[in-house]
Image (cartoon, rainbow, N blue to C red):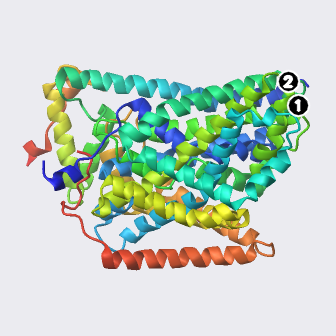
Amino acid sequence: MALSTVAWVTLLISLLVVPGVALVVLVRSLRTEDRKLELLTEQDAIDEYSPRALADLRQWIRAHPDDPYADVARSRYDECVRTLREIDEPYYDWSEDQIAELELFEEDE
Amino acid sequence: MSDSEARTAREEWGSRFGFLMAMLGAMVGAGNIWRMPYTTGQNGGGAFLVAYVLLLYVIAVPGLMGETMIGRYTNHGVIGAFKRVFRTRSAQGLGLVVLLVNVALMSYYAPTIGWALYYAAHSLLFTFTQSGFQTTAFWQGFINDPALVIGMHTVTMVAIAGVLVFGIRRGIERVVKWMIPLLVVALLAVAAMGLTLDGGMEGVAFVFTPDWNYLTKGSTWVAALSQALFSTGLGWGIALTYGSYLGRYDDVPLGGGLFTAVGNTSIGLLAVFATFPIVFAFGLQPSAGSNLLFISIPKVFPKLPGGGLWGVTFFVSFFFATFTSGLGITEVGVTTVTEETRLSRTGAVLSVCGVIWLLGIPSAYSTTFLGWMDYVCGSFGLPLATLSIVVLVAWKLGPSRARVIELNRNTGVYVGTWWEPIMKYVIPVVIVFIIAYGAVSSIGTPNQSLMVAGLVIIAVLLAASVAVMHVIGTLPDATAADGGGE
């Protein structure tokens, strides 16, 4: 029995959005974690937040300075900034200008 | 190193591949192989897949991100995670609920793994291709022999204990790293063979021909919601537990969320290709559940060239799927008992496996009892466990804090603010809806009294767990908001 066109389309889209995505994610996940290991071996530390994620963290800390979790957030933010200043090669896509603009919360206090 | 230091030193996954395979193995179980193909075919084929895949991405992926994240953040099992975030004794009762639901779930899942083991063993003996082999008589002879079924249940729990006693890296990871790839290869091979059979494509047409009218039916969306929410293992405590063994530099959203949910569904799709072409090529009934696997499919092997080997491929892979889930479900209890008592890991493994073995005897003895357990756990217990974990992540820690502080830390994919309302509102509403829908739709059916009993059981379970932890729970030493993932 031949499949109808619509069945073929459904089949192909299903394969694309489910196993296709799973395969791409698997490969990407293994590669990125390998890259992290490589950088950690070379320089002992890596930046833990991307530029976008660190900007979110900064905004959240400024909006919630007295939150019970603010100390943890500030400490993680500052640690990431210090790491970015120390390491030669960031894991995320940071430019030198972006790193130079970052300030520690510790320095504000 | 002092004893206390030794006890607090926490294992981590040995490799990224090991973690991903463990997550996939834990979430892929019997339901993927014997339920998803049938559910898809019965609910409009391609139309159901559209609804299911949509809900998979909208609910299961964000939910699993949140659950794995809270595990890595606290570096603790289910009770420890509630302890560290809530910092009250009573709230740890919600963690106890997750633990007890897992133990109850495993008590009837272990006998099912025993069935798979029995069939896998017989496939290796080429029983299914012997002349005069009768599948129904074989199944009835097995399932109606309590000593044999309880014996297989016992062997299953011994095997699970034998793996878990070696820990995360040397136990679970070592096993899943070859079982899951072999499962995938085996399903691919069976699917390829099935598609070459005369009439095999009819099975594919049954599943993938969309009947769009089904998208207007509430039952299609409820089936898709249930499949997306519960077949992915969301809220069972497994992602939390496995996530607690991640290192600080590990990604959560890409592996723990996206890969786990979509990878799990990929195996479900593979199962569609592995079973339905065979079912249609040989004119079998595409029924859901154990009958398809243990009665219908074995009829086919004698008729296939090299049928004995296909039997081995099929049943050994089915055993792998169930066994790796058993490891994940049992590890929830083992991790928690190791952390919350003075027992060593070996002691915790023996205790948890012993309790599960004991509680599993009624389910091994009677399939009717197993069916009741499945109904109560699936309809009420698991939704309550999922709700408890969602409350922890989205209502106590808070989705905004969770996302900016922990979820996007070392992430392989940036998670935007869209994640927050899904965790806080969409998932809990869906869970409550599914519980309510299940309860209302069972009124006037034979399941009505079981539904009432189920609701009473979860209410008592919740109240008793909160009361017990209020009395025996302890408070964490660390300061309020520190995560363990340092």
How far from the left and from the top, in percent, is residue A42? 20, 20
Residue B153 visible, this orientation: yes
For mark 2, name the chain: B
Crowding at dot 2, Cα within 10 Å, few <14 / some 14-19 / many 20+, comes out as some
Q: Amino acid at mark 2?
A: Leu
Q: Which residue, given by chain and number where applicable, does mark 1 sit on?
A: B281
Looking at marks 1 and 2 on the same chain, the residue that comes earlier in the sequence is marked by 2
Answer above or below: position of B314 versus B436.
above
Q: Is residue B417 left or right of residue A79?
A: right
Answer above or below: position of B124 versus B323.
above
Structural distance between the alpha carbons of marks 1 and 2:
6 Å
Quarter where residue B340 is shown: bottom left
In depth, the one of B466 and B2 nearer the eye is B2
**Badges 1 and 2, same chain:** yes
Residue at 32% x, 66% y is B86
Q: Give the SS element for disc 2.
A: loop
Residue B98 visible, this orientation: no
Answer above or below: position of A108 versus B350.
above
For mark 1, name the chain: B
Residue at 70% x, 42% y is B119
Q: How many marks?
A: 2
Q: Which residue, given by chain and number where applicable, does mark 2 sit on?
A: B197
Q: Is residue B428 left or right of residue B193?
A: left
Q: Are marks 1 and 2 in contact (CB under 8 Å)?
A: yes
